[in-house]
Amino acid sequence: MAKSGTPFTLGVASGEPLPDGVVLWTRLAPDPLNAKRPGGMPDRTVSVRWQLAEDRGFARVVQSGTAAARPDWAHSVHVRVAGLRPGTEYFYRFSVDGHVSPVGRTKTAPAPDSADTVRFCFASCQRYEHGHFTALRHLADELPDVVLHLGDYIYEYGKPKQPRPGRYVRPLESEAECTTLAAYRRRYARYHMDPDLQAAHAAAPWITLPDDHEVRDNWAGTLPGNGGSPSAFLNRRAAAFRAYYEHLPLRVRPTGPDLRNFRLRPYGRAVDFMIVDARQHRSGPDMLGREQEEWLISKMKTSTARWKVLAQAVFFARRRFPNGASSADAWDGFPDSRARVLAEAPDGLVVLSGDVHNNWACDLRADWADPESAALGVEFVGTSVTSMPPDTDAKAILELNPHIGFFDGHRGYVSCTASMDDFSADYRVVDYVDRRGAPVSTVAAFRVEKNRLRRIDL
């Protein structure tokens, strides 16, 4: 099968864990960057065998079967496995035409009545050309129960004519911006060929959420974000979401330009993960759109989990800048939407965010300017895996925003532990991404106490 001889050049992945099941993923691509035929595959359906076992050596196979890899979905495979035990580690692999894939590790969600501690990591913003995905290799080494990816899995940009220092460490597959299905497919292939990204996918199940760069910078709702025809943009969005589905272990396929991203993923009695799309449903002054906002508020009201974890892409807390401005592309641009969500804030609210390429930690308050006002929850904002940060006057921002308690400018991810008694977050960082081999360290650690941040001495 073409260059490497194996069709499993893009690795394997699992995701969307339930107490009794998980989605297994791979994509056949013996020639992953082929510009004429997606993945270098023939234009026909291929039967792929899969196995799920209790051990890495596959001595105890519990389920197996075949799945159809169809050319119209770029020969991607999404196997919905059911009938599994809750809170259990499994191993999986694929095979076709004598070729066997790498082995992946996955884990089902805990049973609804489980009080087990949940260990998870979250990450975002992994621009390929800005550096190496070393942080993801370290994330893989933690073997978390689940990984949350909060957007900007790929970047649609082409190569700039005059790259700034540190902005073009690794070459892309094309110098052109992605606008077509073929281009998005090749960009995802470029990313999935990275060994550190493959390791992170093979280490744990993922729950993913797109932000803007999976489609186009700063898009919102049906609007392109940077000018252009709305109808042409919806065609582009349809292509982008199709490629997104083809390259990730999702349960739901897109329908044209629409992809339902908001969903609840319960993790026993410890955590309810409420995944919210802060991009696709924006309209006028509403960040989430009526249907999604009503869904979120209903889930917050009815959740009985100790921690209600709202996972979404963009900065949630208020953030004022020295020039008096605020970010229109974050929740600051939709203050009424944020106020309605916070008006229903349950005990144990934790918001997870990405997008801004720096680490922040915030208290969510009834009155942003009053440290003694009611504590409504906390927000942990994770930095980027590689994407270079904007120029940030962090000292001035912290002085203007007393509810923001932490800033850090490294690249990395956040490692969290949620139990019936405690929620903690460790900011895990690397010192460089322009070359391989950076060690990882914890730059700061926090606990949540009475819906407020408490920094832990390292």
Image (cartoon, helix red, strand yellow):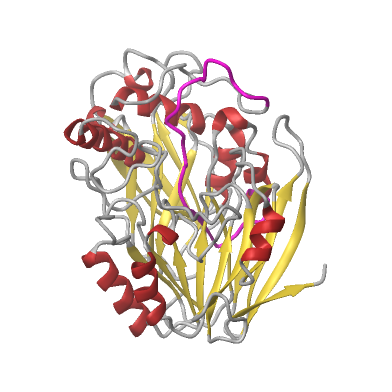
Expressed as whole percent of the image width and height from the top left, the position of residue 227 reads 29, 33
How many numbered discs? 0
Expressed as whole percent of the image width and height from the top left, the position of residue 88 reads 51, 66
Residue 105 versus residue 186 in the image, above or below: below
Residue 446 drawn in magenta: no
- Which image quarter: residue 222? top left
Question: Image check: 324 left or right of 44?
Answer: right
Front residue (pair 309, 49): 309
Predominant SS along the magenta part? loop
Residue 382 versus residue 101 in the image, above or below: below
- Which image quarter: residue 176? top left
Front residue (pair 370, 353): 370
Question: Image check: 331 left or right of 253?
Answer: right
Q: Which range of residues does the magenta coloring cover?
A: 140-165
Question: Image check: 170 left or right of 20?
Answer: right
Front residue (pair 186, 235): 235
